[in-house]
Amino acid sequence: MLGTRALIEKHGAAVVNDACVALLELGLADYRSLRRYLDRRPTAPPSLAQVDPLIRSRTAGASSTREQEARQEPH
């Protein structure tokens, strides 16, 4: 029971629940299978927002570029 609780804290309840559903469909209902399934589960790469909070959204960058172009004098 404590091992399952630790997996929930590490991976989140929704992920552990989905793993349990998948394992039960395969006829596996033990902690070891659950732990190995979660450890080998491919994780999604972090989004740019998670990597660096200074990265602006595409719309924010586009509007700031348009503002800079509007301020420049024609040559």
Image: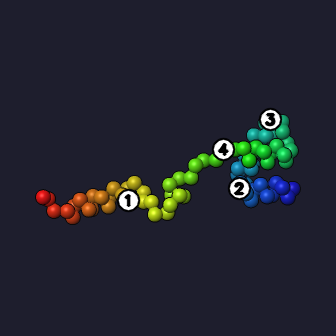
Alpha carbon distance from label 2 to label 1: 32 Å
Residue at horizontal 38 percent and vertical 59 percent from the top: 60
Q: Is residue 45 left or right of residue 10?
A: left
Q: Nearer the viewer, mark 2 or mark 4?
A: 4
Please, which residue is most extreme toward the top here? 26
Q: Is residue 15 left or right of residue 53?
A: right
Q: Which residue is mark 4?
A: 42
The quadrant of the picture occupied by the C terminus is bottom left
Please, which residue is most extreme toward the left here? 75
Q: Tell me which label, 2 or 3, sits earlier in the chain.
A: 2
Alpha carbon distance from label 1 to label 4: 32 Å
Alpha carbon distance from label 3 to label 1: 47 Å
Question: Residue 23 appears at what percent x and percent y?
Answer: 79, 40
Residue at horizontal 46 percent and vertical 63 percent from the top: 54
- Binning the other alpha carbons within 10 Å of mark 4 as few (below 14), some (14 to 19) or many (20 upward) gives few
User: What amino acid does circle 4 point to?
Assistant: Pro
Q: Which residue is mark 3?
A: 26
Q: Tell me which label, 1 or 4, sits earlier in the chain.
A: 4
Q: Tell me which label, 2 or 1, sits earlier in the chain.
A: 2
The colour scheme of the drawn protein is: rainbow
The quadrant of the picture occupied by the N terminus is bottom right
Question: Residue 68 appears at what percent x and percent y?
Answer: 26, 62
The mark found on residue 60 in the picture is: 1
Circles 2 and 4 in contact, beta carbons < 8 Å: no
Residue at horizontal 22 percent and vertical 61 percent from the top: 70
User: What amino acid does circle 3 point to?
Assistant: Leu
User: What amino acid does circle 1 point to?
Assistant: Ala
Circles 2 and 3 in contact, beta carbons < 8 Å: no
Q: Tell me which label, 2 or 4, sits earlier in the chain.
A: 2
Q: Which residue is mark 2?
A: 12
User: What amino acid does circle 2 point to?
Assistant: Gly
